[in-house]
Image (cartoon, grey):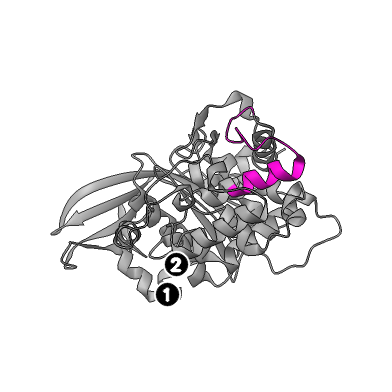
Amino acid sequence: MRDPSAAPAARPPLRVVVSRGGHVENVHHVNYVVVSTDSGITDSIVDSGGDHSTAVFGRSATKPLQALPLVTTGAAAAFELAPAHLALACASHNGEDAHVELVTEWLDRIGCSVDDLECGVMQPFTKDRAIELAASGVEPDARHHMCSGKHAGFLTVARHLGYPTVGYSSPDHPVQAHVRAAIEELTTTRLDDLPLGVDGCSVPTHATPLEALARGVLPFAPTDSPPQPGDTATRLACAAISAAMSAYPFLVAGTNRLCTEAMQASAGRLVCKVGADGVYVAAARPETGQRFALALKVKDGSTRAAESALVHLLARRGIDLAVLDPRLAERAVVRNIADARVGEIRVLTNDVAEKPNTR
C-alpha cells in the first residue's frame, strides 16, 4: 500500500505564459505529476501541481502502453519485427517517406494492405510535409496517418492470434481487450470505472488520472541494466519498446517535432510521447538521481504549452534539453511568418517566472 502522507504537497498548476511585444497574450494552466522509483518495483509521487487525480484521456501519449500486446503476445517475434517497427507502433508521425515506407513494408510482412488500416485518411501531420506531398502529386492514404504504425501493430496482433482483422479498432474486438488489460496492468487502474472515448484514429481511448498514467509510463524509463531473472514479460516488453523509441526517435515523430528532438538530445536517457489536446508523458534516467516518469495535461488543450511544460519539468529533474542541444532553446521564442522574433514563452510556478528551456 502506498502512503499518501509520504507524497510532497502539490504545488499550484504550472502556468505557461506566451507574450508578444512584452505583453502577455496567453496564459495556459498545466496539471502535472512526477513519480519516481529506486527499485523498479515501488514508486512514489515526488512532485505534482494542480489536479492529478481527475481522469483525463491520455490520447496518443498512451501509445507505448497500447503497443505492449505486440510484444507480450509474441506477435512481434512471430513476424520478426525489428526495433524500428516497435518505435513506429508508438508513433504520431509526420507521414514522411521513412514512416510511410516502413508501414508499407510492415503491412506486406503480415499479409495486409493499406485497405486494412482503420485509422482513416489524413493529410500529413506537419504543414511542410503536406505541401511537399501535394507538390509531388501524391494523394495521402491511411499510411500517411500519424497513427498508421499503431494500427499496423494492432493488425499484427490480430494476425498472430487468429482474430479477424476487420473491426480491430472496436472496443469489443479481442485485440482491444489485450490493450485494455495492458493499460490496466501498468496503471494499476480499473478502467471499467472510468470514461471510455474514441480517439481521432477510431480506436478506444481510456481515461485515467494523471497519477495513474505517470505510474504506467514509469516502466518505460530507459535503463542500462541487463534483464533480471525475476523480470516479468511485461517488464521485458516495456524495456524493448523503450529501447526501440530511444534508438529510432525519428520514427516516433519526425522532422521538427519535440518528441524526436528531445530523445535525440538525451542520448538514450529519455523516452517521451505527446498526446492530443495538451497531454505529454515522459520517462527518464538522469545521469544522477532516480529514474522518473511524468504526465501532464494542459487545461485548455494547448500542445505548445504542453511542450514548454514538459521541457521545464524535465530540466527540474536533471534532463535539461536546452543544455543538451542549445538549438532547442529556440522553441522558447515566438516568431512570425517572416521569421522575426516577436515574443517569448515562459513557464511560471508559484507566481515566479522561471527561465524557459525550449519553446
Q: Is residue 270 above or below residue 117?
A: below
Classify residue 163 as left or right of residue 95. Answer: right
- Label 2: which secondary element: helix
* Closer to the eye: label 2 or 1: 2
Asked if residue 153 is among those painted magenta in the image, a careful observer would answer yes
| Image location of residue 290, percent across then percent down | 63, 62
Which residue extends farthest front? 137
The residue that appears at 52% across and 54% down in the rendered structure is: 91
Q: Is residue 113 above or below residue 246?
A: above
Q: Nearer the viewer, residue 172 or 227?
A: 172
Which residue extends farthest right? 229
Asked if residue 97 is among those painted magenta in the image, a careful observer would answer no
Q: Nearer the viewer, residue 80 or 65?
A: 80
The residue pinned by badge 2 equals 261
Q: In the rendered structure, are the residues bearing label 2 and label 1 in contact, judged by CB atoms less than 8 Å apart?
A: yes
The residue that appears at 17% across and 62% down in the rendered structure is: 337
Q: Quadrant of the C terminus?
A: bottom left
Three-letter code, disc 1:
Asp
Mark number displayed over residue 325: 1
Q: Residues within 10 Å of mark 1 (few under 14, many from 20)?
A: some
| Image location of residue 295, percent across then percent down | 51, 47
- Label 1: which secondary element: loop
Of the residues under marks 2 and 1, which one precedes in the sequence?
A: 2
| Image location of residue 69, percent across then percent down | 70, 45
The residue that appears at 45% across and 67% down in the rendered structure is: 261
Q: Which residues are magenta?
A: 152-172
